Amino acid sequence: MSDGCNTSLVLRKGAWTAQEDTRLKNCIEKFGEGKWHLVPFKAGLNRCRKSCRLRWLNYLRSNIKRGEFEEDEVNLMLRLHKLLGNRWSLIAGRIPGRTANDVKNYWNTHFKPRAKHRKEQVKEGEPSKEVFVKTIKPQARTVSKTLNLYPHYIMTNDIGNLITSSKDDIHDTSDISPMLVSSPLVRSDMISENLEGRRKQIVDEVEWSFGALLEEGEGLDVVEQEVDYNSLFDFSVDDVATWDLLN
DNA sequence: AAAACCTCCAACCGCCAAGCG
DNA sequence: TCGCTTGGCGGTTGGAGGTTT
């Protein structure tokens, strides 16, 4: 491996000591986050850069929230997971004080076993209850600084389903909603008046969840993903469809 | 009392994409 | 263009602590 974590036999692993925590914290408070490959040297730690980064992000940062997830946090997590799938860092980014590891652990602890249980049931011959939806997944895990992400729109097609498209695909802007992007090409008066009832609700959810995402510069992709029973709201495969517009 | 089992979560692992020379 | 380094991610594991038998 080229990440420098497995190349040395003398690097410390396992639980962090209070002294190591203090060193790491002091180092980052002094020099700031980033340049993780230098952190072990600056802090005088016999740990790899990944270990230092993880310890800081998941434990030492000042704004980390501890203790049980509250009901609204769980609700938010479920809604975000429905939209994003296992994009723990994105989900955590929208739950103040919680880390990706927290969210992932909570999900695996509280929700994953149920899916597992269902698979076991299927194995034993019971009819499958598995449901799949299209989950919108941002494509880029790391955002390119040079990527142009503006030309995205969300709109409804002629049978009322939500779709997204690029400006190149759009000839009639009468039914465009600026749900996903802060593109200067999309105006508020483009919001479709036809979005009502349930579809409106879906739009609200998508806007609420993805407006920030795309402002940060991430394209969208669609993947099939099993729905957990805990999902608080639902929309079908046909309700939301997106296609990649960046190519 | 103690062995077995379970739960939870911190930490590790392997991979990917961006950046850079 | 290519190969290396780095940052970052999701999946998995190991062990401490709690619970059950």
Image (cartoon, coloured by chain):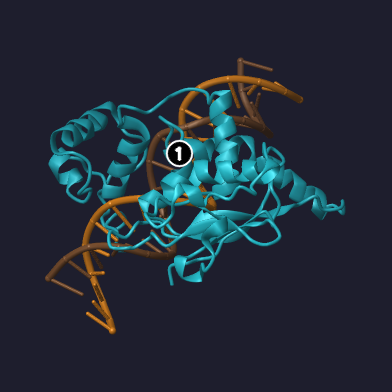
Chain colours: A cyan, B brown, C orange
Query: At x 58% / y 50%, what residue is drawn?
Result: A192
Instruction: Give the SS element for disc 1.
Output: helix
- How far from the left and from the top, in percent, is residue A150? 38, 59
Quadrant of the image occupied by residue A241: bottom right
Q: Nearer the viewer, residue A86 or B11?
A: A86
Q: Kindly tell me whether residue A8 is visible in this rendering.
A: yes
Q: Is residue A173 above or below residue A101?
A: below
- How far from the left and from the top, in percent, is residue A243? 54, 65
Quadrant of the image occupied by residue A159: bottom right
- How far from the left and from the top, in percent, is residue A227? 68, 48
Q: Kindly tell me whether residue A228 is visible in this rendering.
A: no
Q: How many marks?
A: 1
Quadrant of the image occupied by residue A59: top left
Chain to which the residue tagged by mark 1 belongs: A
Q: Is residue A145 left or right of residue A129?
A: left
- Residue behind mark 1: A92
- How far from the left and from the top, in percent, is residue A18? 27, 26
Query: At x 55% / y 34%, what residue is drawn?
Result: A76
Q: Nearer the viewer, residue A179 or C10?
A: A179
Q: Is residue C3 left or right of residue A193?
A: left
Query: At x 72% / y 41%, what residue is drawn?
Result: A229
* Residue type highlighted by circle 1: Ala
Please tell me how crowded label 1 is: few (under 14), some (14-19), or many (20+) other residues with Cα within 10 Å: many
Task: Name the quarter where the C terminus of chain A is drawn.
Answer: bottom left
Query: At x 81% / y 48%, what residue is drawn?
Result: A121
Q: Is residue A199 left or right of residue A155?
A: right
Q: Is residue A25 above or below residue A203?
A: above
Q: Nearer the viewer, residue A111 or A84?
A: A84
Q: Is residue B17 above or below residue A215?
A: below
